[in-house]
Image (cartoon, grey):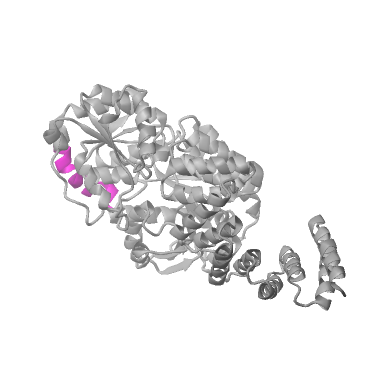
């Protein structure tokens, strides 16, 4: 076969390849290689055909043979890297992409691939550098804009991330993953309604993706414009779309139905780590009666930390379920003979609700990690109390039965290394300092309007706002502008972003020594932040709403004996805050006594709370046994 014929065959093969006729293109490439085994063009094209047919090992071999014949062609090195990545040979893939950009410095595709694999390997700085080079040579590379935006969003540089996400959207207006990331970013920026719009766009494109709907549901809890009925309807939509069909009509559980035997309790969570959930689950794990309850945890977290180790010392059995399918996790729950399975995540990120949808345990409940219904018919109970969910108020908005614990639905363990409480700041500053230390997603325009009325009503008062992302001047300006529209000058606002030492999660507590009164967010109340504020001697004003998410503050403050800090409407919220600000003696008295009040309250009664929780578990179990015990003939 002469050179002219080979060139003609390769040209025809290329036409077939571009037309999608891979089998015909491959047939011609093989003819060429039979005559010239080292023809780099035929090797490269054959490699592309094998790659497109997911024959990655074969593609890699062909690309490597081509590279031997043409070692200076960057595209071949790039394709070697892509094949190696799909074969999960990440270090070799990184080297191949690096070789490609060394051979051709303006090769934007290889720079992107290098950035993507560095990002996947956790090398954030290297990934950012590679994506920057990609965009230097191809400013309209949509996926590079997306990935760079994601890096900036994870760094809390929200405005820069938003600009890149928006550019990526203009270049690729049909990317559901981009829409989810845009929704997440806008939620973190406190723009919940705009975030919901993007979650809806993602859901329209993905169709059967449960995570985009879970993201939307969590975001809806932050919005002032969504009614409790609307929120419940959307949660049940999740159940109908993704969960109801997984519940077999005649599920049989072989668990021993003895009413008073020791029970196996299973907790499912991703948050046995440096996370607020750890504050509330640790005292329970430490206090469980091991003669009557064995504690099993199913952790969907790829990485652990020192808090994980601290929590796991209190459990009988721990299983890492990261990477396991929902079906396999459900089988594991059955195999372990779990009697009561507890969801600690709700619709937060990486939840395992679709494990619960399969009803692997006789009794299932949701508690602690999510401030609303799950929408799943397979979850029997939602654990709460009569302040967060007063009888007759919220039952209609739950797919679960509400199980109300006495006194409080949670128990808090303060940081053992919390700083000492300092003197009342107002005495030294001669002005009142308010504070809001909740996530920006909870900081609604309505809350800003009400807080502005408070600041206007208390002469020369200031407010400290601390939240992730507020280290950035653009985000500070966003919040300042909202207050300015209500007549509050930006000089009266002080901002703090995420504190640098968050490994122990306690370094920020000393900031409360600059605060006289904390202002709770609404409709989504604070939980950990409220407990921390009270422990640091700072009273909290909260607004009682008509759903659990907007009544957590009622539960916490009532538990400690601060019912007078609970407002019934916006005007009452303003009035109570202003009145408290005018009474420095009371603020000083509270500052000196709040820790003592908390210590003798149900909120810190670790053993008492755990006994109440265990009594609830036992009651749930006995109800199930009685419902599933066949009467004697």
Q: Residue 592 lies in what quarter of the image?
A: top left
Residue 568 visible to the viewer:
no
Membership of 549 in magenta stretch: no
Q: Is residue 591 left or right of residue 479?
A: left
The residue at the point 17 percent across, 40 percent down is 591
- Seen from the viewer's position, the closer of residues 563 and 155 is 155
Q: Which residues are magenta?
A: 589-605
Predominant secondary structure in magenta? helix
Q: Residue 40 lies in what quarter of the image?
A: bottom right
Q: Position of residue 565 (x, y in %)?
A: 27, 33
Note whether 198 is above or below 619 in the view shown.
above
Note whether 418 is above or below 387 in the view shown.
below
Q: Position of residue 109 (x, y in %)?
A: 61, 57
Membership of 604 in magenta stretch: yes
Quarter that holds the C terminus: bottom right
Total marks drawn? 0
């Amino acid at each position: 076969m002469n050179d002219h014929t080979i060139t003609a065959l390769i040209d025809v093969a290329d036409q077939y390849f571009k037309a999608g006729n891979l089998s015909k293109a491959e047939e011609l490439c093989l003819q060429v290689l039979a005559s010239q085994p080292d023809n780099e063009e035929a090797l490269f094209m054959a490699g592309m055909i094998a790659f497109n047919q997911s024959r990655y090992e074969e593609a890699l071999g062909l690309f490597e043979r081509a590279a031997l014949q043409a070692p200076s062609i960057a595209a071949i090195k790039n394709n070697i890297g892509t094949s190696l990545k799909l074969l999960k040979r990440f270090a070799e893939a990184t080297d191949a992409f690096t070789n490609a950009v060394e051979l051709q410095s303006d090769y934007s595709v290889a720079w992107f691939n290098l950035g993507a694999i560095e990002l996947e390997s956790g090398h954030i700085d290297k990934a950012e550098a590679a994506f920057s080079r990609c965009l230097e040579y191809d400013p309209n590379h949509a996926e590079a804009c997306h990935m760079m935006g994601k890096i900036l969003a994870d760094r809390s540089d929200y405005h820069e991330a938003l600009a890149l996400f928006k550019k990526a959207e203009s270049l690729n207006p049909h990317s559901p993953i981009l829409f989810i990331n845009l929704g997440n970013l806008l939620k973190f920026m406190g723009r919940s309604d705009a975030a919901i719009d993007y979650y809806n766009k993602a859901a329209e494109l993905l169709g059967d993706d449960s995570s985009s709907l879970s993201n939307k549901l969590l975001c809806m809890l932050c919005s002032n414009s969504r009614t409790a009925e609307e929120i419940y309807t959307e949660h049940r939509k999740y159940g109908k779309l993704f969960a109801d069909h997984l519940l077999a009509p005649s599920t049989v559980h072989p668990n021993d139905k003895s009413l008073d035997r020791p029970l196996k309790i299973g907790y499912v969570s991703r948050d046995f780590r440096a996370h607020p959930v750890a504050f509330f689950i640790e005292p329970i794990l430490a206090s469980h009666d091991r003669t009557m309850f064995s504690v099993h945890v199913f952790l969907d977290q790829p990485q652990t930390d020192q808090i994980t180790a601290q929590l796991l010392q209190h459990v009988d059995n721990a299983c890492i379920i990261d990477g396991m399918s929902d079906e396999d996790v459900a089988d594991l729950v059955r195999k372990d003979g779990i009697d009561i399975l507890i969801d600690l995540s709700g619709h937060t990120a990486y939840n395992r609700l679709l494990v619960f949808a399969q009803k692997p345990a006789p009794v299932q409940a949701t508690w602690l990690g999510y401030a609303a219904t799950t929408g799943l018919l397979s979850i029997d109970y939602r654990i709460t109390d009569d302040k967060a969910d007063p009888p007759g108020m919220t039952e209609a908005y739950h797919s679960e039965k509400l199980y109300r614990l006495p006194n409080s639905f949670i128990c808090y363990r303060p940081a053992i290394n919390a700083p000492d409480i300092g003197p009342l700041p107002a005495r030294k500053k001669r002005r009142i300092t308010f504070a809001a230390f909740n996530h920006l997603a909870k900081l609604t325009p309505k809350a800003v309007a009400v807080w502005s009325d408070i600041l206007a009503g208390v002469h020369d008062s200031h407010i400290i706002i601390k939240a992730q992302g507020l280290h950035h001047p653009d985000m500070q300006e966003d919040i300042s502008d909202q207050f300015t529209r209500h007549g509050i000058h930006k000089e009266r606002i002080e901002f703090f972003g995420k504190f640098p030492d968050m490994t122990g999660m306690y370094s920020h507590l000393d900031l409360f020594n600059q605060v006289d009164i904390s202002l709770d967010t609404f409709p989504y109340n604070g939980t950990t932040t409220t407990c921390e504020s009270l422990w640091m001697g700072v009273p909290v004003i909260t607004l009682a709403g008509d759903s659990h998410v907007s009544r957590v503050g009622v539960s916490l403050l009532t538990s400690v004996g601060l019912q007078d800090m609970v407002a019934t409407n916006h005007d009452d919220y303003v009035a109570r805050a202003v009145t408290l600000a005018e009474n420095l003696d009371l603020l000083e008295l509270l500052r000196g006594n709040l820790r003592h009040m908390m210590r003798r309250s149900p909120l810190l009664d670790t053993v008492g709370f755990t006994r109440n929780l265990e009594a609830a578990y036992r009651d749930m179990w006995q109800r199930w046994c009685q419902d599933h015990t066949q009467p004697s003939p």
